[in-house]
Image (cartoon, rainbow, N blue to C red):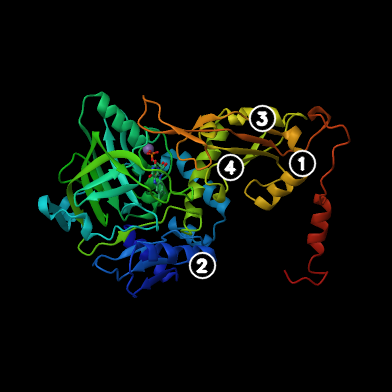
Amino acid sequence: MYESLRDYLDKLEKEGYLLRIKKEIENGEEIFTILWKLAEKGKDDPALIFENIKGYTIPIVANIFGSDSKRWALAFGLKNTMSIKELRNFVISKIEQKNEWKKPILISSSEAPTKEVILKGNEIDLFNFPILEWHPNDNGRYVTYGLAITKDETYGVNVGIYRMMVLDRNKLTIMCSPYQHIGIYLEKAKKEGKKYLECAVTIGNIPALIIAGFTKLKIRENEMEFAAALNGGQPVKLVKCETVNLEVPADSEIVIEGRISVENFAPEGTFGEYMGYHEEKMEYPVFEISCITHRRNPFYLTTIVSHHRADGEALFRSVVQNAHFYRELKRAEIPGFVDCWLPLYGHGFVGIVSVNKKFRGWGRQLLYKIFGIPFVAATINCLILVDDDIDPANLDEVIWALGTRVDPYRDVVITKPIAMYGLNPAASVRVKPPETSAEISLISRMLIDATLKAEEDGLQRKPPIPVKVRKEMVQTVEAKWKEYGFVE
Ligand SMILES: Cc1cc2nc3c(=O)[nH]c(=O)nc-3n(C[C@H](O)[C@H](O)[C@H](O)COP(=O)(O)O)c2cc1C
Ligand SMILES: [Mn+2]
């Protein structure tokens, strides 16, 4: 399987999925706009290497996953095209097959390409790297595809992707939200009387490691071990850091080592976030850099986070969130649960669940049960329940259910405002409880029972019967298909 980001890019090039752009690129907004246009097209989008960035010698790599279903399989070293559901199910199977997880292997510095250049003290200068302002209203330069590696005595090693804004040539802010593992590690370090949390950020790695970096695992689970399962069972090769007690992937294009302060915060934002909006300025911990190592001619890997249209690969990434959603619902043992989906355009705020109702009149009951799952209560504004003849990932079918199975007064529950996850553009209020380091939103929720109703739901007429083909007749017709004169 893949040894490095370069190895993966070579594979993409061989398969016709890589475009090298030689024309000089003016700034980050130009890259954002190219990716927006590409995602608007919506298919066959190649990975991109911008070889000529004005003012920089280091090229930028973007769109490494894209929206092409054949390319998704390549990320896992598979040959066939993968549908979006197959992609989700593949990720779920690799999370659950723990025997495929492998402990990383430690190799020596002399063998590690990421140690080809080592910069310390005055040699450290983030402005030599093409970390740009991507969206027109961004208030700073953002690292978007950095994998932050941290360690805790109780929980072990963690890898996660969290946004970072450049403050200075050797300082960044890092978004350590308290509900993410890095935030939990930081708060724990503070409680233990430590002044900082050591951190190493790697940029430019094998697809498996990047995917592991945005997959929500349990806090004691090590994303590096999971990455091996996604990379054909090949363990990740690590090398010791220069200035912190951490190990980083030996194949990294760029590694930033340093310390996240438990007490120094700096204003950061706004930044065009994944919901498709810029939110207010916030305060995040300062990450002071003690060393940068990189390959001799490194690539700088970036992604545009801000919008489903900003980057084709947003679709690929949403699948990992869907794997998490599915596993949470499965674990909650909702009676009759069949399938679920978080549509890309809902940005995690709209959830659709299909069920096989064991009893007539149970739709509303199930809605409340699902809403009681912490992940759902923390993130979803609008929860839609459908019958199992509807595929929740097929939005045309979902709209059909909304149009034909919902009497709004009878079937929609609207709650009072309830606390939830902070980055919610629709919320009327954002507040910061004094005991947490992050803000929360207050927003009401809408629960829609879009299943077919019966008398038990208050229906005062006979339930309508959906039009369907009969299985036996489908088989008969299929057997005669060519005789009718159809080719396929
Ligand atoms: C491109 C990209 C950027 C992300 N930026 C952030 C971020 O700024 N803050 C955050 O809390 N999560 C961010 N995430 C989501 C986390 O990476 C994801 O929830 C991951 O599971 C966190 O790791 P953890 O579970 O070990 O904390 C981002 C994901 C991607 C793909
Ligand atoms: Mn984690």
Comparing 226 with 450, the one in front is 450
Comparing 431 with 5, the one in front is 431
Kind of element beneath mark 4:
strand
**Which mark sits nearer the N-terminus, 1 or 2?**
2
Q: Pointers 1 and 2 in contact (CB under 8 A)? A: no
- Name above or below for residue 200 compared with residue 70: above
Q: Residue at x 34, y 34 (%)?
A: 183
Q: Is mark 2 within 8 Å of ligand 1?
A: no
Visible residue check, residue 112: no
**Which mark sits nearer the N-terminus, 3 or 4?**
4
Residue type at tag 1: Arg
- Name above or below for residue 345 compared with residue 31: above
Whole-percent x and y of residue 252? 27, 54
Residue type at tag 3: Leu
Q: Tell me the mark number nearer the camera, choosing from 1 and 2.
A: 1
The disc placed on residue 44 is 2
